[in-house]
Amino acid sequence: MATATATMRKSLLTLHASTAADVMSANPMSIRDQASVREAVLFLTDRRISAAPVINEAGRPVGVISEADILNYDREHIDHLHPVPEYYLRSELTLSSGEKLPDEFEIEVDDDSKVTDIMTPVIYAVTPETPIESVVAELVSRRIHRLFVVDDDDSLIGVITTLDLLSRLRP
């Protein structure tokens, strides 16, 4: 029994940080609120991130755009021309590569929706001086994966993700 307790004590991990500044990733990638939804898709995919803060012209966070926001929007709002205009059916359509388009192709209606139309308009933020216990409590109680770090002017200066916290755990 004593061996099991000693092994258990050795396996406990401690978060080696005292404030939000100790764990935050500075200068997070963000996207402007007036970017198109298509730009947001490319932004997230190209950077291999699942979400990003949305900022206004002043650089202040106004929301979060996530893959889930985009998927929900796409599921509910994708439009196609119905029926396909007759001239498409009569002509032989080919791509610039010479490849013929399949008979059942659809034409997507151009979408001019902006990030601000589909983002989650809530920001959970802390300051760099916020105690690490409060950071963890905020993430857990709100059941969120990221907290933003803002300065005294409410400008975005960092982000804290659950992965940032996990990377600071040590025996």
Image (cartoon, rainbow, N blue to C red):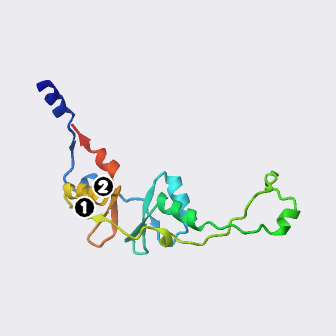
Which residue is depicted at the point 67% across and 69% down? 109
Which residue is depicted at the point 53% across and 65% down? 73
Distance of mark 2 from mark 1, alpha carbons? 8 Å
Q: Residues within 10 Å of mark 1 (few under 14, many from 20)?
A: many
Which residue is depicted at the point 24% across and 61% down? 128
For residue 54, what is the image quadrant?
bottom left
Contact between labelled residues 1 and 2, with CB atoms less than 8 Å apart? yes
Q: Position of residue 5 (x, y in %)?
A: 14, 30
Residue behind mark 2: 24
Q: Position of residue 98 (x, y in %)?
A: 82, 52
Taking the image as shown, residue 84 lies to the left or right of residue 31, namely right
Q: In the rendered image, which quarter contains the C terminus?
A: top left
* Residue 128, disc: 1
Q: Is residue 108 above or below residue 25?
A: below
The outermost residue toward the bottom is 57
Q: Amino acid at mark 1?
A: Pro
What secondary structure is marked by label 2? loop
Q: Residues within 10 Å of mark 2 (few under 14, many from 20)?
A: many
Q: Nearer the viewer, residue 152 or 113?
A: 113
Q: Nearer the viewer, residue 4 or 12?
A: 4
Which residue is depicted at the point 53% across and 71% down? 114
